[in-house]
Amino acid sequence: MNIRKKTISITSPGVVAATALLLTVSPVQASSVGEALYMQHCSVCHQPGGKGIPGFFPPLADNTRVNSDDAATIQKYLRRVIFGYHGGLIVDNQMYSGRMPPIGYVGRLNDSELLNLINYQRSAWGSNARAITFTELAKARKAGSLK
Ligand code: HEC
């Protein structure tokens, strides 16, 4: 009787921990977290499919800066997302001169939420750009706003 009880109480937390670990490392789960954050913080302007609204909100889908593999371009992109931006942009021959809010600024989204969100965009809507690292994000945070 006693032995049986003990077995159950040891196994159950183990199963719970293993399930939690599987959920954490599963790529499907990670990408849906990024998607949920995108829908919550970005889609109202850049639209659920990332196409933006011409003349008002630039597209993030098929945007060469958003999907770039060039280190300097990635830094610019990260700094715009973290600190917001209001400097004027041209995307697909269309001018934009709106104001992007500082969504990723300290206290709004933490680093792992930001990475989830950013890497969702870089792998969504037909794109296959490499994942951004914590080191790159930390560098952009340190560098500060672009304007
Ligand atoms: C309130 C509307 C709004 C929200 C919300 C918003 N943005 Fe923006 N975003 C803009 C505007 C407007 C610009 C263009 C700014 C300019 O022209 O100077 C912009 C520009 C950008 C750019 C630069 C694009 C380029 O071609 O370099 C990126 C990247 C970007 N936004 C990502 C995001 C992400 C990621 C989120 C969510 C975390 C987000 N934005 C939320 C309005 C918004």
Image: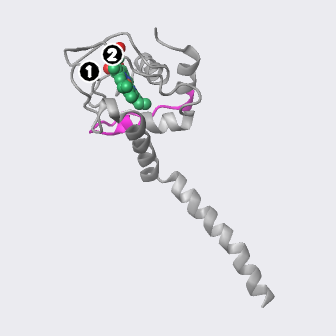
Q: Which residues are magenta?
A: 119-135
Where is residue 8 shown, x and y percent of the image?
70, 79
Query: Front-most of 128 and 34?
Result: 34
Query: Label 1: few (<14), some or many (≥20) within 10 Å?
Result: some
User: Circle 1 — which element?
Assistant: loop
Where is residue 99 shown, x and y percent of the image?
37, 17
Where is residue 88 shown, x and y percent of the image?
33, 10
Residue drawn at (45%, 50%), measured in percent from left and top?
27
121 within the magenta span? yes
Image quarter for residue 20?
Answer: bottom right
- Identify residue for label 2: 98
Left/right placement of residue 126 relative to residue 139 reads: left
- Report if the CB atoms under discs 2 and 1 are less than 8 Å apart: yes
Queried on whether the Cβ of the residue with tag 1 lies below 8 angstroms from ligand 1, the answer reads yes
Image quarter for residue 138?
Answer: top right
- Which amino acid type is marked by label 2? Gly
Left/right placement of residue 138 relative to residue 83 reads: right
Q: Measured along the vertical axis of the image, is residue 65 above or below residue 6? A: above
Q: Measured along the vertical axis of the image, is residue 136 above or below residue 88? A: below
- Which amino acid type is marked by label 1? Phe
Queried on whether the Cβ of the residue with tag 2 lies below 8 angstroms from ligand 1, the answer reads yes
117 within the magenta span? no
- Identify residue for label 1: 56
Name the N-terminal-most of marks 2 and 1: 1
Image quarter for residue 80?
Answer: top left
Where is residue 28 shown, x and y percent of the image?
42, 52
User: Quick one: quadrant of the N terminus?
Assistant: bottom right
